[in-house]
Image (cartoon, rainbow, N blue to C red):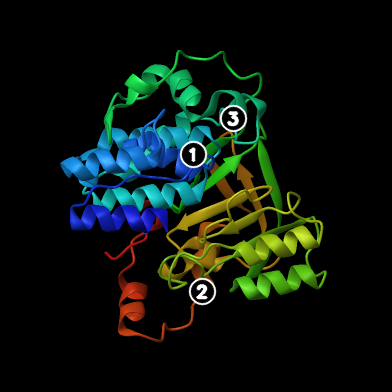
């Protein structure tokens, strides 16, 4: 809803202020983007910009402020949902090429401190941005310049979290995103392939998936959904079965916020676009090499080409939904209309 509200403000050329506390990667990103002012209440800032009718949202949201937002959100542990929301906002603000910025900044920005850490409780988002220092641009905000409101840089946290890894298929050009905890070198397992979240969640609850499996869930991408699916039901099923954090997931959908374990998500080309994920079968051995950022299977490319590709259900319903299913952009381009 926050992303939709900002997009509406950009589209209608209106001012916008973020009143949400910067406690999640996305609300932290919005604050770092310049949509709130540290040290002032959102109501104060809203009154100020209402009197002047300035600055408009599309003035605040530009390439440098979006980069600040991305870096802040990733430093708070943001994953694929953060990337998709920011890519959507960038497209609406006509900041082109932001998907390339995501790949560069994503690789070089580890998690510094989550909202539950003692370090973040003490220093907050202002301290986090000050700690990031020269990596943060001094952009315009809804009330002045960003660095005017930041305190001196705090000491470094004792421990840091995971990192975002952009995975690639060696021969296929397939790409996926994964937040990797610590220095984990790889994960592997035997594929259990599902064509819907409902089917996967039911199999987990029925005890048909054990901790040697690598869940492959396809048909959940922007065109396959239709609409990029946030896989909350599968995460709940894994938690109920005691498998959350033990069974990795490979999907063209989007993992839930704060999902436990390894979720390799936003896979493109998605299954509905004849991506390799749509040609995997039960029993294939899958390995994610995080050090080399490679997706590897024990099936030769020529053999994959001979397999019957995934065919999802033909979209039905409103003309709007059908049009979206046939024209949706990849997730890292915002998953909107092409």
In the image, is 223 to the left or to the right of 80?
Answer: left
Label 1, on which residue?
A: 22
The answer, for residue 149, to whether it is visible in the render is: yes
The one nearer the camera, 140 or 136, is 140
**Count of marks, rendered view:** 3
Q: Residues within 10 Å of mark 3 (few under 14, many from 20)?
A: many
Could you tell whether 283 is left or right of 58 in the image? right
Measure the C-alpha gap from mark 2 to mark 1: 41 Å
* Residue pointed to by mark 3: 113
Left or right of 276 on screen, residue 55: left
Q: Is residue 95 visible?
A: no
Image depth: mark 2 or mark 1 in front? 1
Helix, strand or loop at disc 3? loop
Q: Position of residue 88 (x, y in %)?
A: 34, 54
Q: Which mark is residue 62?
A: none
Task: In the rendered view, tell whether residue 140 sits above or below residue 274.
Answer: above
Q: Which percent across, then down, holds residue 53?
A: 17, 45
From mark 3 to mark 2, how far is it between C-alphas?
Answer: 40 Å
The crowd level at tag 2 (other Cα within 10 Å; few <14, some 14-19, many 20+) is many
Residue 329's image quarter?
A: bottom left
- Please, is residue 294 above or below residue 65 in the view? below
Residue farthest bottom in this picture: 317
Label 1 SS: loop
Q: Where, quadrant-wise, is the C terminus in this rendering?
A: bottom left
Establish if 271 lies above or below 289: below
Closer to the chain start, of discs 2 and 1, is 1
Give the Cα separation between the discs numbered 3 and 1: 13 Å
Closer-to-camera residue (252/90): 90
- The numbered dot on residue 310 is 2
Could you tell me which secondary element the residue under label 2 belongs to?
loop
């Amino acid at each position: 809803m926050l992303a939709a509200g900002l997009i509406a403000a950009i589209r209608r050329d209106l001012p916008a202020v973020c009143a949400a506390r910067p406690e999640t990667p996305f609300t932290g990103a919005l604050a770092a983007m310049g949509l709130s002012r540290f040290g002032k209440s959102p109501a104060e800032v809203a009154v100020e910009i209402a009197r002047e009718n300035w600055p408009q949202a599309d003035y605040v949201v530009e390439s440098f402020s979006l980069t600040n937002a991305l870096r802040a959100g990733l430093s708070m542990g943001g994953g694929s949902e953060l990337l998709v929301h920011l890519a959507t906002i960038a497209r609406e603000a006509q900041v082109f090429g932001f998907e390339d910025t995501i790949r560069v900044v994503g690789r070089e920005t580890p998690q510094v401190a989550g909202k539950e850490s003692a370090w973040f409780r003490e220093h907050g988002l202002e301290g986090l941005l000050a700690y990031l220092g020269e990596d943060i641009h001094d952009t315009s905000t809804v009330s002045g310049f960003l660095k005017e409101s930041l305190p001196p840089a705090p000491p470094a946290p004792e421990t840091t979290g995971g990192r975002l890894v952009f995975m690639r298929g060696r021969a296929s050009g397939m790409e996926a995103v994964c937040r990797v905890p610590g220095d984990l070198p790889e994960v592997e397992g035997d594929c259990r392939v599902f064509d819907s979240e409902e089917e996967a969640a039911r199999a987990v609850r029925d005890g048909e998936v054990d901790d040697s499996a690598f869940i492959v869930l396809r048909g959940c991408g922007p065109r396959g959904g239709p609409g990029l699916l946030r896989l909350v039901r599968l995460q709940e099923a894994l938690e109920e079965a005691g498998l959350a954090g033990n069974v990795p997931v490979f999907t063209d959908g989007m993992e839930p916020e704060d999902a436990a374990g390894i979720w390799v998500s936003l896979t493109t080309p998605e299954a509905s676009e004849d991506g390799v994920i749509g040609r995997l079968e039960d029993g294939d051995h899958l390995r994610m090499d995080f050090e080399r950022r490679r997706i590897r299977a024990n099936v030769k490319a020529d053999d994959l080409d001979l397999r019957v590709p995934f065919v999802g259900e033909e979209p039905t319903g409103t003309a709007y939904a059908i049009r979206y299913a046939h024209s949706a952009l990849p997730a890292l381009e915002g998953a909107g209309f092409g």
